[in-house]
Image: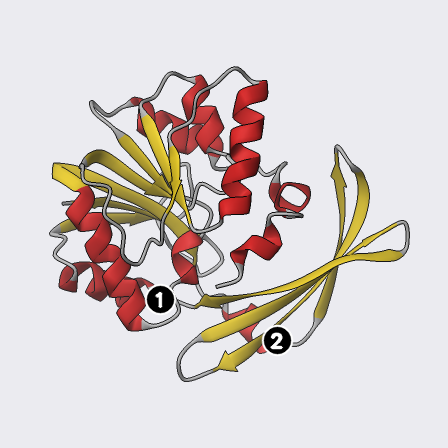
């Protein structure tokens, strides 16, 4: 999937995002038993959970991102339990009380087969009565109508100031697959360029996927504060029980 290319710039682009941290921290603190974070990356959320003394493991497909996570954990005096694994088909040999998939990572599953295989992997790793919590955006109708338009954003990180320019476009409209080209500039010079592909998944579509994967009960909210989902402009936050 080429995620390793993002390890170089992930913290620059997303390291300051904190909207979801308190939510996942609160949910992880509320369980008795082990927690698994899928797609833990460089540790933006994972290390916050570890600092709280939560018994949390992490998996990610990128060895380079996990190397950065371990370096940061060492500097903080923490001992992470993370490993390289593909969310579509992994076997850790143990079950968890809670599986979390923050920051829209589920959308990297492009095909229906990948989505079902991933959900089945989650189901297999949950204790009876365990929960799966994940979030991703509702397919934004305005965004889809405005495809191929370039956006620009100023990013400020510990390493300095950057300009991020992004453009999204459909790879396949019928299959709901988009690709985003991200170009990062520093001091006016090209610093990095990369692409990522995501699937667009609607609410009722995901409910069918959950049902087919064997989950029995779920609720979806319109953000991390528990408000009802009433608009495609809201983030979908899913609380799923095995």
Q: Which secondary structure lies at badge 1?
A: loop
In screen coordinates, is 12 left or right of 34?
A: right
User: Which residue is rendered at x = 65% and y = 63% of the image?
Assistant: 194
* Above or below, 235 relative to 193: above
Most distant residue in the right direction: 188
Query: Percent from the top left, x then y, of residue 210?
Result: 20, 58
In screen coordinates, is 197 left or right of 8?
A: left
Q: CA distance from mark 2 to mark 1?
A: 18 Å
Report which residue position mark 1 lands on.
Answer: 202
* Above or below, 112 relative to 36: below
Task: Name the quadrant containing residue 230.
Answer: bottom left
User: Which residue is rendered at x = 50% and y = 40% of the image?
Assistant: 66
Query: Percent from the top left, x then y, of residue 175?
Result: 39, 80
Query: Percent from the top left, x then y, of residue 13?
Result: 66, 46
Report which residue position mark 2 lands on.
Answer: 147
Mark nearer the N terminus (2 vs 1): 2
Query: Percent from the top left, x then y, of residue 73?
Result: 52, 24
Res 13 visible:
yes
* Above or below, 92 relative to 204: above
Q: Which secondary structure lies at badge 2?
A: loop
Task: Name the quadrant containing residue 59.
Answer: top left
Viewer-proximal residue among 149 and 76: 76
* Above or below, 225 relative to 50: below
Tag count = 2
Give the quarter of the figure containing the C terminus: top left
């Amino acid at each position: 999937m080429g995620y390793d290319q993002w390890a170089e710039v992930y913290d620059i682009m997303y390291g300051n995002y904190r909207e979801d941290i308190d939510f996942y921290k609160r949910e992880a603190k509320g369980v008795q038993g082990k927690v698994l974070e899928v797609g833990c990356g460089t540790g933006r959320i994972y290390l916050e959970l570890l600092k709280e003394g939560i018994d949390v493991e992490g998996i990610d497909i990128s060895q380079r991102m996990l190397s950065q996570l371990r370096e940061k954990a060492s500097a903080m005096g923490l001992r992470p339990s993370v490993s390289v694994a593909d969310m579509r088909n992994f076997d850790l040999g143990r079950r968890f009380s809670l599986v979390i998939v923050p920051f829209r990572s589920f959308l990297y599953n492009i095909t229906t087969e990948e989505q079902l295989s991933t959900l089945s992997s989650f189901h297999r790793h949950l204790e009876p009565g365990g929960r799966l919590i994940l979030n991703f955006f509702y397919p934004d109708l305005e965004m889809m109508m405005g495809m191929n338009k370039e956006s620009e954003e100023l990013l400020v990180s510990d390493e300095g100031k950057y300009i991020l320019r992004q453009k999204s476009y459909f790879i396949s409209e019928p299959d709901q697959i988009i690709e985003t080209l991200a170009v990062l500039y520093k001091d006016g010079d090209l610093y990095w360029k990369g692409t990522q592909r995501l699937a667009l998944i609607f609410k009722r579509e995901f409910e069918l996927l959950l049902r087919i994967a064997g989950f029995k009960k779920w609720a979806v909210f319109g953000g991390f504060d528990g408000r009802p989902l009433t608009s495609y402009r809201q983030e979908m936050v899913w609380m799923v029980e095995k």
